[in-house]
Structures are given as C-alpha cells and as structure tokens.
C-alpha cells in the first residue's frame, strides 16, 4: 500500500498518539494546571524531563517566574480533567476551584502535585530552548512521587483501570491497554548461526 505524502504538515502531531499529562505550576501566590502532550525524558543521569509550552499559556509565565513545574501523570478515568484544564486559562479562572482539583505542594518545589496523579515529577528548570511557537523547558527531576498501589515493585504501572491517557489530537483521546513483555533481540550474525 502506498502512503499519502503531505508536505503541508500543520497537523503532523495527530498521526500517532502521545501521553496526555497535566503540568502544574505556582508563582506569586497563583497556582495553575494545563494539559500537556508534548513532553519527554531527555537525560537519565542527571535526570532531566522536558515540556514544550507555548509562550501564550499562563503556565509559561508561571514557569518563567518560578523556575519550577510538576508533570502529573493521570489515570485513564481522569481524561475529562485533562480536557477540562485544556479548555480554559488560569489567567481567567482558578482551575483548582472550578474543577475541584485536589493537590498538595511538591516536596521540593512549590508547584502542586495532584492527589489523583499516578506519578508526578517535580522539576526545577535548567534551560529554555525556543522551538518555533513553543519553548522547550528542560527540568532537573528533583523528586518523583507515585501512588504505590498503582505500581508493581514501585516501577511497573499496573494497567487495571488506570491506563495512561493518550492524546490523539483535536479533542480525541484513547487509553493504553494491555501490557506485554518483549525480549530485546539482536540479529544473530550468519557465521554464528551456521556454526551452531
Ligand atoms: C490533550 C492536550 C494536550 C496539550 N498539550 C499542550 C502542550 O504540550 N503544550 C502547550 O503549550 N499546550 C498544550 N495544550 C494546550 C493547553 O493545555 C491549553 O492552551 C491550556 O488552556 C493552557 O492553559 P493555561 O493558559 O492556564 O496555561 C494541549 C491541549 C490538549 C487538549
């Protein structure tokens, strides 16, 4: 089957889902929460996590002022909350009051950790890289909080109704279901395969 080739790629990020998170921030007595799908780990040692935030977002201002953010990884049944915090700006309303969001301050940063998050990364900004219409904030992960009942041995997420939320673009979401274990494989060199 031949693929459709597009060179006008304004909605390129629709073609494969990305995990939808809620990024929280706090500065000068104001806290905020926004949906973020553009985020990734960028370094293991030291541990760095990055989020791409448009300068148009109120969150951008709070991160610039505080140098901190928290990435909250939500369970599948909180997808509506992700959509809710994406639909308005903290410039206009207090989303925590409006949506009944429960939280407590981070252990190392003042940005809030959401009570319903499966896990949260508390980050201190180490850099800001302007990337087109977004800024990529890299953050040193200064603490990780996680819900122990959701993880086997504190690391492997149990997919029992708490599946990660995937963002498919526009207003579409999916849930990641069905964990599987796959062994990594390197192709066996031909000589070895013949000799054995
Ligand atoms: C699922 C989803 C993911 C989003 N991801 C991002 C993102 O990665 N970066 C960004 O700047 N905006 C993103 N947005 C848009 C913001 O969440 C939205 O503009 C929000 O209202 C900003 O809130 P604030 O002004 O209170 O910071 C996303 C929206 C949705 C629906």
Image (tube, grey):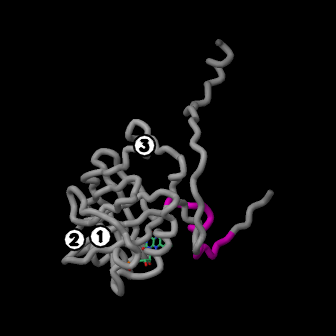
Instruction: Find disc 1 in the rendering and name its residue.
Output: 25
Label 1: state its secondary structure.
strand
Counting residues from the start of the chain, the first of labels 3 and 1 encountered is 1
Magenta run includes residue 176: no
Could you tell me how far apart the alpha carbons at marks 1 and 2 are, in whole angstroms? 8 Å
User: What is the x, y in percent for residue 143?
Assistant: 26, 51
Instruction: Respond yes or no on whether mark 1 lies under 8 Å from ligand 1.
Output: yes
Q: Mark 2 and mark 1 in contact (Cβ < 8 Å)?
A: yes
Label 2: state its secondary structure.
helix
Ligand 1 sits in quadrant: bottom left
Please give the name of the residue rendered at 50% of the width and 52% of the height, measured from the top-left corner: 162
Crowd around label 2: few <14 · some 14–19 · many ≥20 (10 Å): some
Instruction: Find disc 3 in the rendering and name its residue.
Output: 151
Residue placed furthest toward the bottom: 92
Q: Mark 1 and mark 3 in contact (Cβ < 8 Å)?
A: no
Magenta run includes residue 16: yes
Counting residues from the start of the chain, the first of labels 1 and 2 encountered is 1
Could you tell me how far apart the alpha carbons at marks 3 and 1 are, in whole angstroms? 25 Å
Q: Which residues are magenta?
A: 6-19
Up/down of 62 relative to 126, above or below: below
User: What is the x, y in percent for residue 169?
Assistant: 58, 70
Frontmost of labels 3 and 1 is 3
């Amino acid at each position: 089957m031949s693929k459709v080739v597009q060179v006008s790629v304004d909605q390129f990020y629709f073609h494969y889902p990305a995990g939808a998170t809620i990024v929280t921030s706090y500065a000068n007595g104001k806290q905020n929460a926004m949906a973020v799908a553009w985020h990734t780990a960028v370094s293991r040692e030291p541990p760095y996590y990055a989020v791409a935030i448009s300068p148009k977002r109120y969150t951008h201002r709070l991160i610039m002022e505080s140098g901190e953010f928290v990435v909250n990884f939500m369970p599948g049944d909180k997808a509506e909350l992700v959509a809710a915090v994406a639909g308005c700006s903290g410039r206009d309303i207090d989303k925590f009051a409006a949506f009944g969001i429960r939280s407590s301050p981070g252990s190392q940063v003042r940005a809030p950790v959401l009570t319903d998050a499966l896990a949260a990364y508390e980050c201190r900004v180490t850099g800001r890289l302007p990337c087109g219409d977004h800024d990529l904030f890299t953050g040193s992960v200064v603490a990780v909080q996680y819900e122990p009942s959701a993880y086997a041995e504190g690391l492997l997420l149990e997919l029992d109704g708490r599946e990660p939320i995937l963002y498919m673009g526009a207003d579409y979401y999916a849930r990641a279901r069905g964990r599987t274990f796959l062994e990594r494989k390197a192709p066996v060199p031909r000589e070895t395969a013949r000799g054995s």
